[in-house]
Image (tube, helix red, strand yellow):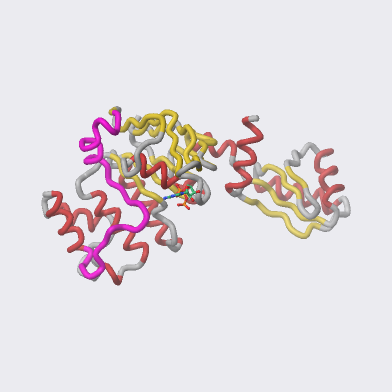
Amino acid sequence: MVIQTNGLSFSFGNQQVVKSLSLQVPAGSIYGFLGPNGAGKTTTIKMLLNLLRTGEGSIHIFGQELEANRISILSQIGSLIEQPAIYHHLTGRENLMNRAMLLQVNENKVDEMLKLVQLTNAGGKKAGQYSLGMKQRLGIALALLNDPKLLILDEPTNGLDPNGIIEIRELMMKLVANGKTVFISSHLLAEIEKMATHVGIINNGELMFQGTIHDLQNISQPLIHIETDNTVDAANLLKRHNFTVTEIDQDQLFVPFNSKQQIGDINTLLIQNGFTVFGINKQRKDLERLFLDITTKSN
Ligand SMILES: Nc1ncnc2c1ncn2[C@@H]1O[C@H](COP(=O)(O)OP(=O)(O)OP(=O)(O)O)[C@@H](O)[C@H]1O
């Protein structure tokens, strides 16, 4: 394991914001650390980077205890938390040159990094004029300059447009293909699902799920959302025809999605039985619904 925590906890005053977290991040993974705002992601990340002192529990990175091996461990981690530390009056290339000199990294590495994050053409432009996505990529290039084995990124896609998100995703995949391990936090399930190999889900400081992306897909199966003129009767009809109805309220009901054909079959069945179908469509589970499933399944 590249990161392994055991019973990791942290409190701000008497508010416990991280509760007995046991994270397992395998080498070569893109580990998506998923949770709503305020769940405790940034606090956890700060502990992993030794920016906050661990309350209780232990952190091992690269198989070594963090506090006792702080310098050697941190020198092999690249990180980006909150805003990237960029000088806006310098060009992207100058920002990298600056850091390269500090770290005594060969200048060649600067151009290599610009290329990796697709900023070669914009390298001569002032970083203050970069879009948010370009700034994030420059921040990642800065974090990668000393060739770390592990990259820890806190919500790197926050505020990015869809293109910016795709660029970050592609970059993560490239990094992992080059043998790195990436730990990336987000509050968006859809975003994490598209790039992660492993996922940890945190809510109110507690780890609610940890596993491979396939394990997650098993519990985050999409749903068919159906709106008709009589929800209760429609649900009963579907149940009589062996469809599972997972949720029902006044205006809508949900059936687990299996195939497009199944949507057509349900539509036909409802119409043939005299129902008016206002809407029928495939829907991904949002984080709240997923939490609900995880908690009901583990009870
Ligand atoms: N310096 C601080 N002092 C007191 N409470 C704090 C401090 N920093 C964070 N908290 C609280 O700790 C909890 C967890 O915050 P944290 O920033 O770790 O969550 P997060 O999952 O990263 O959320 P976000 O995505 O909104 O940053 C929140 O309730 C937050 O208000």
At 35% from the left and 67% from the top, the residue drawn is 131
* Magenta extent: 65-92
Q: Quadrant of residue 243?
A: top right
Residue 85 position (above or below residue 233): below
Quadrant in which the C terminus appears:
top right
Name which residue lies at 24% across and 40% down: 76
Residue sitting at x 30%, y 27%: 63
Q: Position of residue 83 (x, y in %)?
A: 35, 58
Q: At which x and y percent is residue 136?
A: 34, 58
Q: Is residue 108 visible?
A: no
- Name the spot of residue 12 as percent of width and height, x first: 45, 44
Residue positioned most to the front: 13
Is residue 130 rendered to the left or right of residue 97? right
Whether 70 is drawn above or below 137: the answer is above
Residue 180 visible? The answer is yes
Q: Is residue 2 magenta?
A: no
As drawn, 256 above or below 165: above
